[in-house]
Amino acid sequence: VMVMGALGRCGRGAVEFAQFAGIAGEHLLRWDIEETKKGGPFEEILASDIFINCIYLSKPIPPFVTKEMLDRVDRPLSMVVDVSCDTTNPHNPIPIYSVNTTFDKPLLDVSTESPRPLQVIAIDHLPTALPRESSEAFSRDLLPSLLALKDRQSAPVWTAAEALFKEKSALLP
């Protein structure tokens, strides 16, 4: 299993779920900004049985995988779980499908030249399926920053936030 965006909230949840399902160690590949900064496509995706995309797309990036890559007969990849669901974004890093799936029909077959089947799960807003857990996880992540508010002049999270605020405010007309 390969998780792209493994350090974000959704990515951490995907990693935790994979571990809960018994997938760990060398069978769980965790990628984030450092591993993707060179730009795609990424051959490593094809080497996994399951690819889970959890990135936040904030700017145009090269695709992670191409249709031509998926046509290979020797690819182990059989399932793409696109938590990000950027199907309507012209810079979608997984341009192999064009419609989202649903909870009632979660799987979409992807047509390839490979004899190995490939399916996509692309349920828009999938992270909201567990709102309580999402809220609790977000609260756990936010609490240390809120507790550091009393030291906002020196706490890195608050000094960085202030610097970013000033930088972006300076761009306003």
Image (tube, rainbow, N blue to C red):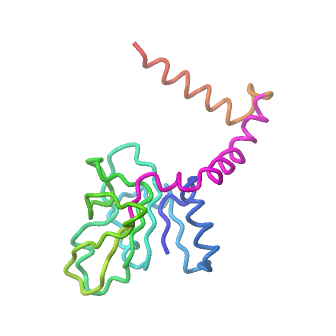
Q: Position of residue 76 (x, y in %)?
A: 37, 83
**Where in the figure is residue 78, as x and y percent of width and height?**
37, 79
Tell me: 154 left or right of 75: right
Q: Residue at x 26, y 66 (%)?
A: 66
Q: Quadrant of residue 148?
A: top right
Quadrant placement of the C terminus? top left
Depth check, front residue: 26 or 144: 144
Q: Position of residue 99 (x, y in %)?
A: 28, 58
- Residue 28, compared with residue 31, is above or below; it is below
Identity of the residue furthest to the front in this view: 104
Q: Is residue 160 left or right of residue 75?
A: right
Q: Nearer the viewer, residue 150 or 14?
A: 14
Q: Is residue 123 magenta?
A: yes
Query: Residue 77 is drawn in which quadrant?
Result: bottom left
Q: Is residue 142 magenta?
A: yes
Q: What residue is shown at x 55% (from left), y 28% (from top)? A: 164
Residue 58 in percent (x, y) is at 40, 43
Which contiguous range is marked in magenta? Answer: 121-149
**Placement of 12 over or under 56, stated as above or below:** below
Q: Residue at x 75, y 29 (%)?
A: 149
Q: Residue furthest left?
A: 113
Looking at the rendered structure, the number of numbered marks drawn on it comes to 0
Which residue ends up furthest to the top in the rendered image? 173
Residue sitting at x 36%, y 57% = 39
- Main secondary structure found in the magenta portion: helix
